[in-house]
Amino acid sequence: MPPSEDPEFGCLDVLSTAVEALSIPPLPYCLIGALALGAYGRPRATHDVDLLILTDRATSHSYLDSLCAKGFALASDWHEANPMARDVVMRLKHTSAPDFPLDLIFATSPLHKNALDRRKLFDLHGTQVSVSSAEDLILLKLSASRPRDFDDVMGIVGNASAPLDLDYLWSWAERLGLQSELHYVLISAKRE
């Protein structure tokens, strides 16, 4: 193990350090991906932190400086291997936890911007974190269309304690062409 790695520094530490770095000056962000599931459904193990941010690659340098000051560095190898993603995602790694990358996803669509407007504040293991609303997380995961994303959505929809704005979901599902996917998960979870 390289001397900079800390076996006690894990995914939640990457999240709390990133949230702290993005707070000055404040950058609108929300947690999406597997870590966000803990707020609404059944948690799922993950090896990265996904934050949707209201900036783009051209204006991200001021936040990159703040993140680097907290121990993050641009994952150049990942960016070289994924050149098509460079305008959509910025991957960073923390020196203490290089196996838990931080993916900053630039808000590039109306759904992304709406998700940032509707984010909610949660306490995740002692850290105040802005998290995507349940509905926006469902829509983002249905858009990704991976098998694990459908499982994640089923966990959110099946959680009876998570009230869902079905009108909002159907409106966006129609805009995104996801009506059949939404219908499937709602019927499967008996929430329609």
Image: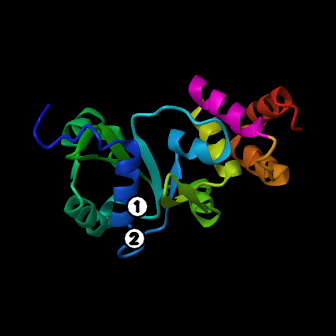
Q: Where is residue 162 in the image (x, y as percent from the top left)?
A: 76, 48
Nearest to the observer: residue 123 or residue 135 = 123
* Magenta span includes 171: no
Q: In this view, does 1 lie to the left or right of 60?
A: left
Q: In this view, does 119 lie to the left or right of 31?
A: right
Identify which amino acid the numbered label 2 is placed on: Ser
Question: SS class of the residue under badge 2?
Answer: loop
Disc on res. 19: 1
Q: Give the range drawn in magenta.
A: 147-159
Quadrant of the drawing holding the N terminus: top left
Asked if marks 1 and 2 touch (Cβ < 8 Å), the reply is yes
Quote the CA–CA distance across marks 1 and 2: 6 Å
Q: Name the residue under label 2.
A: 23
Q: Can residue 88 be seen in this view?
A: no
Q: In this view, does 26 lie above or below 34?
A: below
Left or right side of 130 for 106: left
Label count reads 2
Amino acid type for the residue under numbered disc 1 = Val
Disc ID at residue 165: none
Residue occupying the point 72% across, 37% down: 178
For the point 61% across and 61% down, the residue is 119
Does residue 92 appear in the picture of this structure?
Answer: yes
* Label 1 crowd (10 A; few <14 / some 14-19 / many >=20): many
